[in-house]
Amino acid sequence: MNTKTSLILATALTAVAAAPAVAETWDMPLAYTGSNFHSVTAAEFGECVTTGTGGDIEITTHPSGSLFAGNDIKRAVQTGQALIGERLLSAHQNEDPIFGVDSIPFLATSFDQAADLWEAAKPTMEELLAGQNLKLLYSVPWPPQGLYFKEPKESVADMEGVKFRSYSNATARLAELTGMLPVQIEEAEISQAFATGVADSMISSGATGYDRKVWESLNYFYEVDAWLPRNYVFVNMDAWDGLPEENKNVMLGCAGLAEYAGTWRAKEYTQFTLNGLREGGMTVETASDQMKDDLREIGETMTAEWLEDAGEGGQAIVDQFRSMQN
Ligand code: PCA
């Protein structure tokens, strides 16, 4: 290297080093409360990205729907009002039935099966989201869904007329088919809804009941293992496309870690939170055989309805998932 070239190179390097890194803050709206394991995982993901990009991108999480209400998070990220966010995937089933693939009753009822179903659905989901200007980053399941009530229930017939808190199309449909009265309420607001009698029941995980201390109002949790819905984290596609390659790689690396850590937490939290519900004074038990049979029948109706709505694309995912179960 001659003196002139090395001088130019040295000057160029100084210029690079001296150029102020354009640090950006990415606000990350979350629908769920800060203590929830999904929100904890998202906060760690944010720190990972901030560290990994050397501060180029600083991610700040906003739990409890405090920046955008749960229902508005996806639209906010699609339109670039926020560049990244997290939401319950099945909350969008009214936009496209594929978003509800994780809420087909009794299709995937364990963490292993939920992982297989996600593997089968992921390419379709990525494409669907890309068509909506969103890049899918990672997804973490909730623990298995069971039924919460104030009064004891032996069968679906006992559920007639009960006010039921729903969180998605599938949960509202389940309420209709069991003769309950659905009212859509975000997780951040359920403690109040139960305390004031706006709702007296719901389907959810032990984790959510535990996080929201529902034993203050409800008394029974029946383990049904109906499905394991997922949260997913997504980025505005224009913002994603504009990232330098190295920052994309950091995000993808942090996303992989977050998915792993979040899934691990979900598993660990399952038994821990069921015990917590008991300690809070609730009766926690498996549903009666009668209730199981009744719910299976309703599950078959909902499966048939979903398959009809979702068409060939949906059938292909379910077929692939089933072929993975042998
Ligand atoms: N908790 C969330 C979704 C599924 C779950 O277990 C909720 O109740 O809103």
Image (cartoon, helix red, strand yellow):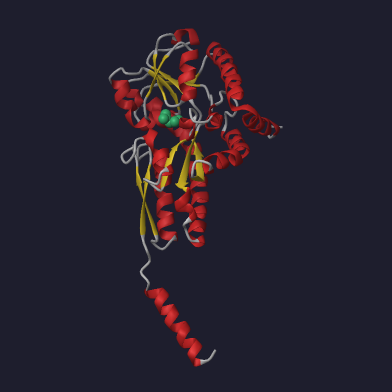
Q: Quadrant of ligand 1?
A: top left
Name the one closer to the observer, 240 or 54: 240
Q: With respect to residue 31, does 198 lie above or below?
A: above
Q: Is 135 situated left or right of 199 in this image?
A: right
Residue placed most toward the observer, 43 or 310: 310
Residue at 48% over, 43% down: 262
The quadrant of the image that shows the C terminus is top right
x and y, in percent, of residue 266 in the image: 48, 38
At a point 51% along the width and 45% down the height, the residue shown is: 138
Q: Residue 252: horizontal and vertical position, in percent?
A: 52, 53
Residue 155 in view of the camera: no
Q: How many marks?
A: 0
Name the spot of residue 282 as percent of width and height, x first. 39, 21
Q: Position of residue 292 (x, y in %)?
A: 55, 15
Q: Is residue 286 above or below residue 68?
A: above
Q: Is residue 41 above or below residue 176?
A: below
